[in-house]
Structure formats: C-alpha cells, structure tokens
Image: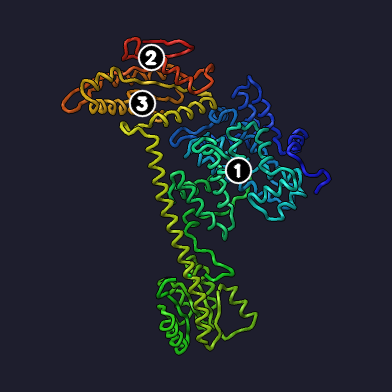
Amino acid sequence: MSDNGPPAMSKIEQLRINGQLPSPKGVALAIMEVSRRDDATLDEVARVVQSDPALSSRLLRLSNAATASGARPVASIREAVRRLGMASVRQLALSFSLVDQYLEGPCTAFDYAGFWSHSLFMAVACHELGRLIRCASPDELFACGLLAQIGRLALATVYPADYANVLATESRGAALRALERERLGADHNDFTAAILADCGMPKALAEPVYHHESPDAAGFADGSRPQQLAHLFFHARRMADLGCAPVDERHGGVSELLRLGGRIGLDAPALGEVFDSVVEQWRDWAELLKVPAGPLPLFSAIADAPVPRPEESLPATRNRQRILLVEDDPMSRMMTEGLLDHLLGCTVYSAENGKEGLALALEIMPQIVITDWLMPVMDGLDFCRALRGTDWGQSMYVIMLTGEETEEKIIEAFEAGVDDYVTKPLNIRALNARMRAALHYVKLLEAWETDRAQLKQFAAELAVSNRRLEHAAMTDLLTELPNRRAGMEALTRFWSSSQRTGQPVAALMIDVDFFKSINDRYGHAIGDRVLQAVARAIQKAARRDDSVSRLGGEEFLLLCHDADPRAALLVAERLRRMIKAMTINVAGMEITTSVSIGVANRENSMPHEDDLLRAADKALYGAKKSGRDRVCLFANGKTLGG
C-alpha cells in the first residue's frame, strides 16, 4: 500500500476537491464553465467548440450519426451543437478530453490503450442500441458508454502502484470490485459515479451506469426506464467484451449476445447487422481519437467459427463416424481400415498421401483423421499443418501413425496440430484406446454444435416473439396506429429532443365530432370503419418525422417535431379540411364526418411534457365548445381561434 492508505468513500470527495481525479482541460473545461451559467446560449457554446478543430470534427461526426437516414447532413458547428444540445455537448467534450489526456499513464499493469479501445466500442454500441430501444438520446448514451468504466482509469491514475497489485490478481467482475474495496476503500464504480457527477451527468443516466455491471441486482422496477438503461449498458458492455476479446476467447461471448439480442427483438442476423455496424463505426472513431482498434470479422463469422480446440481434455459422436485414413503403405492401410471398420464400426475413407488426403478431407469432412508421418508428395506433418490452416479443418481430431518416439519428434508432431499418436507397428489395444478418446471428442463436439444451433433457433424465436409482443403492446388493434402507451413514449422523446436542441414541438389533439351519434345511428361496426378511415387520414397528413397515435375512443394525438405554432396550425387546418372532404363508403352507405383539433406548443413556462398535453386538451375543448369542426390554439395561457 502507499503511504496515503486506502481511501474511505469520503476520500473520493477529497480527491475530487484536490483535483486528483481525471478531469477535463482546455476547451472542454471552458465549455463546462460556460454551460453552467443560467444565461448561457448554444451560440456561445458553439463559439467555444469552434476553437478546437479536433472537438469540432468529433461533434460533427456524432451529430451526423444521430441524423435520420436521408436527412440533410450537418455541416456547421452551430447546427451540430443545436442538434446535440448543451448537456450532450458538455458531456461529450469532457469525454473526448479525457481520452486525449489519458492514452497512457503511470500504472504499469493498466492497459490504457486497451481500456479506451473497449470504452469506445461500448460508447458506439450504446449509441446504436439507443437508436433501437429509444430510452434516451443516442448521443448522451455515447458519452455514458465512453465513461462507464472511467473509475478504473481513476484508480490507475490516483493509486498506480496499489492498483497494479490489484490487477496482478487477475480478478474480474464482483471479485475485482471486492478487492478494490478491500485494498483501496472504494471500487471503480464509486469513482465512476463521482466523475459522472463532475461531468454534470443527470442522475437518471448516472445511476443505471453505476449498476450496469449487475443490472438485475440494482432493484429497478421491471420495465422502468432505469432498468432499460442499465440493461442497455450491460448489453453494450458485452458487445465491447466480444469485440475486444482475443480470437480464442470470442466464442464465449456469442451465446450471451444472442440471448441479449433476443430480449430486445433481435434475431441472429439482425444482431449481426447491429454488431457489424458498431465495428465499422468503432474503427472510424478509433482513427479519429487515435485509439487502437484491431481487425474483427463479421459477427456471422465469429458465431460460426470452428469450435475452439481443447488443450487438455479430449472431446465427441454418432454411430458410423467418418474417418479419413492417410497411409501410403497398402498393407498397413488395409489392416488399419479393417480394424476401424469391423472393430469400431466407423466409415473409413483412404488416401495415399497428404495431398490426396487434403482434397478428400474437404469432400467428406471427416470427424477423425489418422495419418502416417512419412509419406511421398506431402508428409504427415505438412498435411496436418495444411489441415489446421483451414477453417473447416480446425475441429477435426488428428492421430499420427509414427515409428518415431523421441521427445523432439513427438513435440514437433503436437506443434504441427496433432492431437494424439500411435506407434508402429500398430497395437490393436493402443489404437482402440486412442480411438475411444477421439470418439469422445467427436461426441462432445457434436453436442456443442447442437447446443449452438438450438441457441440460435431459440434466439431467433425469442426475438420474433418479443417483436410481436412489443408491437402488440404498443399498437391499437382497431386502427393499427400506435396506442396511448406508445403515444406517451413518443411525447417524452419529442419533449426531451426539444429541450435538448431548442427546436419547437407541437401537440395536436384530434377528436372525431359527434362520434357517439354515428355509433347510435349506424352501429359500432360502422363506427369502427369511420375511426379507421380517420386514422388513415391523420397518418397521410402527418410528416415523416411526426408521431401519430390513438389515445382511446375517438381521440387521436399528432406530435409534430420542429413545428412552431404557425406550422402546427397549418398542419391542423389541412387535416381538418381533408377529413371534412372525405366520403366514407361502408355497406353501401356514404358517411361524412369532421374533427375538432386542439393545438399547443412547448413553452418555457411548461416544466413537464404533461403540461403540453394538457394545453392541447384545453385547446381541443375550446374547439368543441366553439361549435366543433374547427382548430384552436392554446398559447400563453389562452385559447385562440375557434
């Protein structure tokens, strides 16, 4: 231990006060200071950002990554800052500042480059998963992913020698956190929480980050936003674990990712698309931030990679195993074929040298290969090396027939990829024993392949089931529009985006006039057809980025992104006229109807999204009270129009 002794939790605060925790410098610090002022504007923040070309290019990249496909790309820093919002710009500037400052450090056991490579992968994964799950702004999630493990960097920075000793134990997960608390008085998650607080990260994001390593133990309510976020961070962490794992350890993460993908409605191909997209962006970001990013195959290649070869245990089988015998001596070949066929019940294919054996192996895909060492054209060692050099030959079990028993020769054979050997002349009992081990390997191998196939199938079925359930839970069965729950979630997203970017957002409450009389006169079946026709009309009138939902009964909600009061009124009036002019043909009858529409925009006096909904509802009441078939606007506490 150092002379300072282990820090108690209160000491984290002392370290923060003394400036010993990793903290932003330069432009990032200036952005934080500007954004803390109550009168700060986005234009001021943009001017500070423009003074740092590296930060400018990074924010432009992230802003364009969050832009919907087909939309005009962001070209100016001012527009990028406006789209991202002040809070996100502050968090991202701090994150990038920390990456630039701590690409290396004093802790000899801490892999700084690997840490940032993994953190960057997690950041991109958070961003992409956030676009799918929509529980927070993707750019905020990017910053969360980049800083989710920042406490580990803090420990390596503040206590380099002591933390090197902790890391030398190779502890992971809960064991690592326990050891950190024991030796340093607090774990890396505690330090992460302190740094996130310094970043101005809202508690709604910081708390799920704190619990992301064990989200199920956090105690968040099922289905709540904190639980969704904690699981999103956990999912992104596992994607980063797989992306940064050594080649021989990647297979272990595939199964868990398939299971996690199934939980959010992603089958294996869909999960692969997300993962591959993350990898591509990770490489681009790594180049921009000067962080290492090693080569990585497509997710499908990782998932379908050959089973890793066991080093000590001999694993696999079914009846009539396919065995390839490569032997140049005819008498020895006939005798060995007979033993394998009659005594062990295997199907034997023969080749006279390694070159023939390689071609035949590709054709028949044997589970077990028995090869002589000394042969013309291509000997047993070269044959084995060539076999192991292919993807399809990795998992075959190879037995070498040899007259050599010197230690050097046996080591050479194993280094070439041989699994076992039998000395010549052949001993039946020895061959039988070796074959039992080989068949055991084949049996375990087949079981593993079956489990992998079943897992993929299960993940695909789970993903489809979850997509159906989610669609059903968020869809109105009659009109096939998003239902009230989906509408409220959309309202939260639109509200948050408006707060972050300063762009206006409008809510249009739409009510079908005298709908009860339609039901009373024509019956509920006809009334349902009228509602369906109105729903189609609202969808047609909505812009691409707008949100339409049925709140219940004859009431609908249309949310308009980036629409000021004038634009919202134009949308509402166009919709009112469209429905007024409609003729609904049902069962030989021609039915007409009309709608009343209440319009409201987010105002500075509204602290919550519910206030916007209440304002639109008041405007709707004004439209109905004024005689229906009209549009009213609620603004500055008053109902206008009618």
Q: Is residue 337 visible?
A: yes
Q: In the current view of this chain or complex, which residue is farthest to the left?
A: 588
Instruction: Identify the image quadrant of residue 87.
Output: top right
Q: Do tag 3 and tag 2 residues touch (Cβ < 8 Å)?
A: no
| Secondary structure found at label 3 | strand
Q: Residues within 10 Å of mark 1 (few under 14, many from 20)?
A: few
**Residue 621 place in picture, x, y as percent:** 38, 14
Image position of 287 with respect to 362: above or below: above
The residue that label 3 is drawn on is 552
Q: Is residue 84 left or right of residue 338?
A: right
Q: How much space separates mark 3 and mark 2, taking CA atoms?
A: 16 Å
For residue 99, say whether it is visible: no
The amino acid marked with disc number 3 is Gly
Viewer-nearest residue: 104 or 315: 315
Residue at disc 1, secondary structure:
helix
Mark number, residue 288? 1
* Residue at horizontal 44 percent and vertical 73 percent from the top: 366
